[in-house]
Every structure is written in structure tokens, then in C-alpha cells.
Image: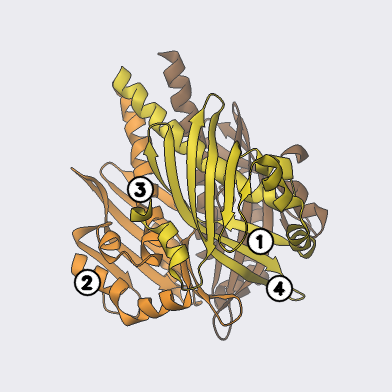
Chain colours: A orange, B yellow, C brown
Amino acid sequence: MSLEVDRLIALEDREAIRELIARYGPLADCGDAAGVAALWWPDGVYAIAGFDEAKGHDAIAALIEGPEHQALMADGCAHILGPVSIDLFGEEAVARGHSLLVRRKASGFEIYRASANRWKLKKGPQGWRVVRRDNAALDGTTVARSLLSGSSD
Amino acid sequence: MSLEVDRLIALEDREAIRELIARYGPLADCGDAAGVAALWWPDGVYAIAGFDEAKGHDAIAALIEGPEHQALMADGCAHILGPVSIDLFGEEAVARGHSLLVRRKASGFEIYRASANRWKLKKGPQGWRVVRRDNAALDGTTVARSLLSGSSD
Amino acid sequence: MSLEVDRLIALEDREAIRELIARYGPLADCGDAAGVAALWWPDGVYAIAGFDEAKGHDAIAALIEGPEHQALMADGCAHILGPVSIDLFGEEAVARGHSLLVRRKASGFEIYRASANRWKLKKGPQGWRVVRRDNAALDGTTVARSLLSGSSD
């Protein structure tokens, strides 16, 4: 029995991680700053290459409430993530994948930014939360590529 | 035993919902109007903000067979969905996520439309089907944002 | 008991296939040619409509190491896949879905290519690997559409 339960838990863990990450885009694009922040651990980090790291719920919520994100929302924006590849290590995990920031223009929509993401996650009594999300624009330099590489962890 | 079976069923339900929604884009882009319609319940609704609601299989199939969709297919188009966040409530569920309509131009491709989607789903003897899909372009107004918000349901 | 184990295995198979396909984009965009090739069986095929088929690990790795892919990486690129619809047939499977190739321009990003994909997969002692991936640009012709159609298999 315990073998099957272990396998069930592994599937539940992967499902919970995928769900957690899938919530980011909808929460960001409806402007739910507290909801976005709650995806992270209280001391979690959202690190966007080239910017100061945001550490903790208040700092992460401030990214959503800040003028840059509010301007994107006023134009119309979609933070769309690609599928994530997930490596489970017991109660910790690493997920890798792309994200697109699509922004409405006067006519049509543009891809404002295409990025690489590496998510470090940890499971606690209330489930999986983000320890650290690294994001870097895919601009031809090695910063973003290293986030997508299995060997970079 | 029953606890584990309940957990297995919850995973199967989430997998079935993700599969159902993942079928939409490929079916739409190969022009399979009956296949698209069959994702919905017979009295299901596909509601695109700013247009009349399509209710029932014939009306939903007519969207695929209609001149606008056929013109998109003649140009070359991709209805690409982002990951969905799924809330399960027994035999009912709500899923939220983005969609992109990518259209081929004379040179290259453009994002013709970026939208928010909320799917209401229900399980029956033959599995999960769509009760209602709401779709609205992410144009900076609150209509689309409310579809992505957890509190709007 | 065996019924539940069968259902568990079916979920694990679908999860493994989704994970396998989700690894493609990150591996391609960080230039891990051997990692990309290892997603396929040793005699696996990657067939891009309009080009010679790449058969076997060396040929598939050569696509990543070749001048076209390296130029994309130097510009900055994202091979982003949409969700896949998966049909399981015991130890074989077919998955269908879209892919976008996003490329950085002097200013911003463009969708360089939007494609249809059909993946044939097979399970072996080391898990699921790709038997054949067919890819065709969504250019309005029937080649790409047939890859997305359930009846084309």
C-alpha cells in the first residue's frame, strides 16, 4: 500500500506545483496583489534580472501595485506562462519554463517581453509555495539561458 | 482505502479537465466544428464579450464554420491557451486562464487577440464537459480582469 | 487494488508525457543539444514540414547545434509550447498541440513561427520517449491542420 500512496503523493505534488504556478498569470492580470504575494513563502524572493530583488509578501505585492504593472493593466496585458518542467526532490522542487508578457497596443497586441523562469518551491503544512522565482528576458545573453538549463541548479 | 481512491479521483478530475480544455485549440485550428462543440454540454454556452452568446452544439459549431473563423484558418491561425488554474468543487469546477489568437500575416505572425477565459465545467456519466466559457479581450477594461479574478465567481 | 493501480499508472503516464514535452523548450533555448536529443528514442524522428527529417540523436542534436538555431539563440528566442492533448494507448501515445517560436528583434519580440505539432511517444524500461515529432507552420495549408486533427493518426 505504501508504495502506491507514495506514487499518489508524487502526482499530487506535481499537480499542486503546476496549479500554484498557473495561478500567477490570472492573479497578476486582474491586479490581485495579495493573491500574487501569497503564492510565495513569507520570506520568498521574486528576482527579475536587472532589477532589485523583491523579498517578502509586501515587496512582491508592491510589484503588482506599482506604476509599471498598473500601466500594463491599463493598456491590457497578459502574463502567459508556458508549460513548466518540474523536478521533485521530496518536499522541495525546481520548475523551469518560459513566460510571455503580451501588451495591447493602439492596434493589436505585442510581445513586450519573453523570459526564462526558474522557480524554487517548498512544501509546508499549507502546501507548496514559492521560495524564489528567477526571471530573465531572453535577450541572447547567458543569464536567461542558465535559468533554463538543468545544470544551473 | 477510500481516502486514497478519493485522492485518485481528484487527480483524474483535474487531468480530465485539463485535457478537455487542451483539446479546444487543436480542434478549432483544424476546423473540426463538431469536435469543438462536443467539448460543451448540449445546452452549454460560449460567451465572447461584445458578441451574442452561442448556446448549444449547433450554435458553437457555427462559430467554427462561420466566415470569420474560416478566414482565420485560411490565413493560418493558432488558438493557443495558457495553463489553466482549476478549482474543483466535487462534480463541478471552474478553470481560469489566458488564450492567444495568433494569425499569420503576409510576413510573419501577429497576436490578433489576447483574452481572459473562465470555464465552468460539470462532470456527467461521460465525463467532464463545458457548461459555460466566458472569453473577453484583455483591453484594459474590467470585463476581462473579472474573469481572471477568484472573487468573480 | 489492481484497478486503482491501473488508474495510478495512467495518471503517471500522462504526467510523464507532459513533463517530457515540457522539457523541449527549456532545453532547446539553453542550447542543450544532447538533452534535446535524449527526449527521443535513439531512432526517433523530428520531422519539420518542408525540411529533411532528422532521424536519430546525432541528427536531432545537429538541429540545435546548427547555424539557424544558434542564430536564434544569439538574438534571444523562446520555443514555447501550448498545452498538449494526449491520447494514451497502453504503452504508446499521441499528443497534439501548438508551438510558438518567439524571437527578439532590435526592439521587442516577434512571433517568428506558429506551428502545429503531433508527437508519437512510446514507453520503455527508462520511461516515455518521443518516437516521432511532426511539426508544420500554421500557414493556412492543410499540412499543419492535419497534424492537429484526431482523424489524421
- The reply to whether residue A1 is visible in this rendering is no
Label placed on residue A17: 3
Amino acid under label 2? Ala
Q: Chain of mark 3?
A: A
> Residue B119 in the image: x percent, y percent?
49, 48
- Is B54 positioned to the left or the right of A58 in the image? right
Q: CA distance from mark 4 to mark 1?
A: 22 Å
Query: Residue B108: which numbered mark, if any?
Result: 4
Q: CA distance from mark 2 to mark 4?
A: 39 Å
Question: Which residue is under mark 1?
Answer: C63
Query: Does mark 4 fall on the same chain as mark 2?
Result: no
Chain identity of mark 2: A
Q: Are marks 4 and 1 in contact (CB under 8 Å)?
A: no
What separation in Å lies between label 1 and label 3 (alpha carbons)? 32 Å
Locate residue C66, reporting x and y percent. Answer: 65, 67
- Whole-Å distance between the Cαs marked 2 and 3? 22 Å
Task: Estimate the spatial distance between the alpha carbons at disc 1 and disc 2, rounded to whole Å.
Answer: 42 Å
Q: Is residue C1 visible?
A: yes
Give the number of the mark in front: 1 or 2: 2
Task: Tell me if A39 is positioned left or right of B145 in this view.
Answer: left
